[in-house]
Image (spheres, rainbow, N blue to C red):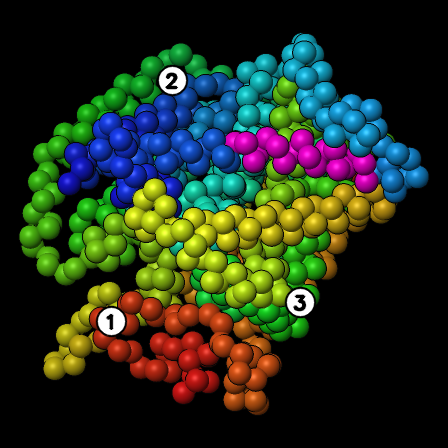
Amino acid sequence: MESVGLNAYLFVGAVLFVCGIVCMAIKRNGIGVLMGVELVLNSANLNFVAFARYTPLGLDGQVIALFVIVLAAAEAAVALAIALNFYNNHLTIDVDRGSELQG
Amino acid sequence: MTADVLFWLFAALVCGGALGVVVTQNIVRMAFWLILSLGSVSALFFLLGADFLGAAQLLIYVGGTVVLLVFGVMLTASGPYMQIKTSAADGLLGACVGGLLFLVLVSSISGMDWSQLHTTNTTPSVIAERPEGNTLRPLGLAFLGLRPDRPVTEGSEVKPAPGYLLPFEIVSVHLLVVLVGAAYLARAKRRANPSNDSLSA
Amino acid sequence: MNGLFAATSISEFLSGLKLPFAGSLSPLWVLLIAALIHAVILINIFAILPLFYIWLERKVAGRIQDRLGPTRVGGKFGWLQTLADGIKLIQKEDLAPGAADRWIFRIAPYLAVIASFAAFIVLPFSDGWVAVSLDVGVFVILALMSLEVLGIIFAGYSSGSKWALFGAMREAAQMVSYEIPMALCALVPLVIAGTLNFGEIGRMQAGLMHNWLIFHDPFTFIAFFTYFVTATASVKRAPFDLAEAESELVAGFHTEYSGLRWSFFFMAEYASMFAVSGIAVLLFLGGWHTGIDLEASMAGFRGWMPDFLVPGFTLGNYLVNLFGAKVFVLKACALVFVQIWVRWTLPRLRIDQVMTTCLKYLVPISCVLFLGAILWPLLLASTLKRTTILENAPPLGRVIVGDAAAVRPLPTGMASSPQQEAAE
């Protein structure tokens, strides 16, 4: 049995997750926020695959991870289209400027 | 031994890339760090014996999604090397909240005894039986709705467990809808053309 | 051990090797040395192929344009012209323009080269001669080759020049679009082979030429040519080299590059040409088999000098495999020659024509081919009661369920491939 176990992978996933959350929170560039979302989804994927390897979750973990990858690609496509529309309307991609609907 | 060294190498790359994404202000450099991070995640997938997932991660994430993001960067840049800076207060607050969240995650991960999972459920795992990581066939069968690796006893008869055929179909239809929707959203609008405006007015 | 460093045959050889002073090697050392040998061999192939191809390109271009091409360096045929060019490029100053984002500008060529080189890891040169034999080899190689576009986008964007940016945008749009028909066309023979492992696909095509997957049915035959067109486009060769269209964009994405970094882009391009040709050879053109069944006549030779140095290692077998590797490289070089020939014969398309060709023609064509390749065995099974056109030909492909069926025999209708059904 190798010394690197489930916990090590979960820690890497935790770092990815926190980085993604912080990235989503502090970036003002819309594309930067999207990158944060990608990091969070990847941390979830890493956890799924680690559980698939080290616990009896087995293949299901990998299947779910594949679904996540596919949905993330779809999400990126739609989000990018939205970002382009945002840019068309505001001539910037700074998400702080999208405050027209504020009460 | 070698697997350990490779794990630590790629884990460091994953974490370093993710930190780079957070810290960097230049959006294209952020994309570079993102590639580093996601590519190393795919290497970790290979180490975890998920060959197909690792390749899918490379093809879809690194080769597809990130290219899309860089496209977005280029199409939305209002000047060369556009930088939209995060204010120092925002960054500090984000770092504090992120640090606390990380501590919560670490304490909960290390407080959990995962080995219980091994004993409560004795179903053999495909992955455990195949350290080589050839999960291609089982994955394909699972998507076709067949799980020969997970026999379910139903009365006297042993049946393969149901797979993921319906989610697979739903996801494929979803992808088609997204394709059409994204193309519709991002289509070129001729709003800026004044002659068009006067015509419609 | 993990599939990531399965340098199988060489590590088996090393682990069997008895050193005169230290006995047999420990598994860790075997792994490291085997990995090192693979890396050295692949890096050499990766470096020498572009040298040869650039010379070939100049020579072919010269002949097509009724010139001689390089004649001076290294004798009558200018063999060493590329080497001289390389030495010149190394000596050149490594410039970065003032408007460039220097850090990314410097890193981008390495990204392109790494992506292009990584494809060679899963490309088998002969029976078992592969650095990493993966069950998802074809998928991995397509994934790795799709990464080259990132280096090019970064190069174009960070150059701080509009020509470079235009080139990079064109390149990104083109490569991302052409990936779709390329993968679909690669799927057509894979559907028949029933595996993504290059080694198994290669072994399947042993014997006479009609066993090659290109001659399996009409769809694979057309798929080969469609694949070749999309592959030419995806390695940005003329007539699809819009990313570096000299007449419009100076030199496209590498306008601002000089010296060694510039040559890295070219190494990546020529190595990718070999890689896509190698994929075509493995998937359609019989891999390392000659197609005239020389292998059968050499079968007796395989047993020559058994237990050479190491028990289980046969020198004859090794030499036969070496012959196979030569056949493979020759076939791939022939395809690269066709790419060069096309480049110097056809005029360049416009960028909108390139995109139209892909999205309006190649994608539908490859979809139809894919559908046809799936339906073909069913059609044959229902009309001729066999799955190949020729009588007595062994059915290709392997059982879909494989070892998973060992858990429990599944209902035949669901579990068996069309080939199996026909056999029943």
Q: Main secondary structure of the magenta part?
A: helix
- Residue C25 as seen in the image, left or right of residue C114: left
Q: Mark 2, chain letter?
A: B
The reply to whether dot 1 and dot 2 touch (C-beta < 8 Å) is no
Residue at 23% across, 48% down: A53
Tally of numbered tags: 3
Chain that bears disc 1: C
Give the magenta-colored segment's residue range: C43-60
Is disc 1 surrounded by few (<14), some (14 to 19) or many (20+) residues within 10 Å? few
Q: CA distance from mark 1 to mark 2?
A: 58 Å
Q: Residue at x 79, y 43 (%)?
A: C343
Residue B13 in sight from this viewpoint: yes
- Calculate the distance from the C-alpha at mark 3 to the C-alpha at mark 2: 60 Å
Query: Is C316 covered by the magenta stretch?
Result: no
Task: Please tell me which residue lies in front, B149 or C396.
Answer: C396
> Circle 2 is placed at which residue position?
B90
Labels 3 and 2 within one chain: no
Q: Amino acid at mark 2?
A: Asp
Query: Horizontal and vertical percent for residue C117?
Result: 53, 35
Spatial CA span between label 1 and label 3? 36 Å
Q: Looking at the picture, does residue C360 appear above or below residue C162?
A: below
User: Can you give x and y, in whole percent of width and height, for residue B154 in the image?
Assistant: 15, 78
Q: Residue at x 59, y 69 (%)?
A: C208
- Residue beneath disc 1: C406
According to the picture, the residue beneath numbered tag 3 turns out to be C221
Q: Residues within 10 Å of mark 3 (few under 14, many from 20)?
A: some
Task: Report the mark closest to the observer, 1 or 2.
Answer: 1
Q: Label 2's element?
A: helix
Image coordinates of residue C19 in percent, x first then y, are 28, 32
Q: Which mark is residue C13?
A: none
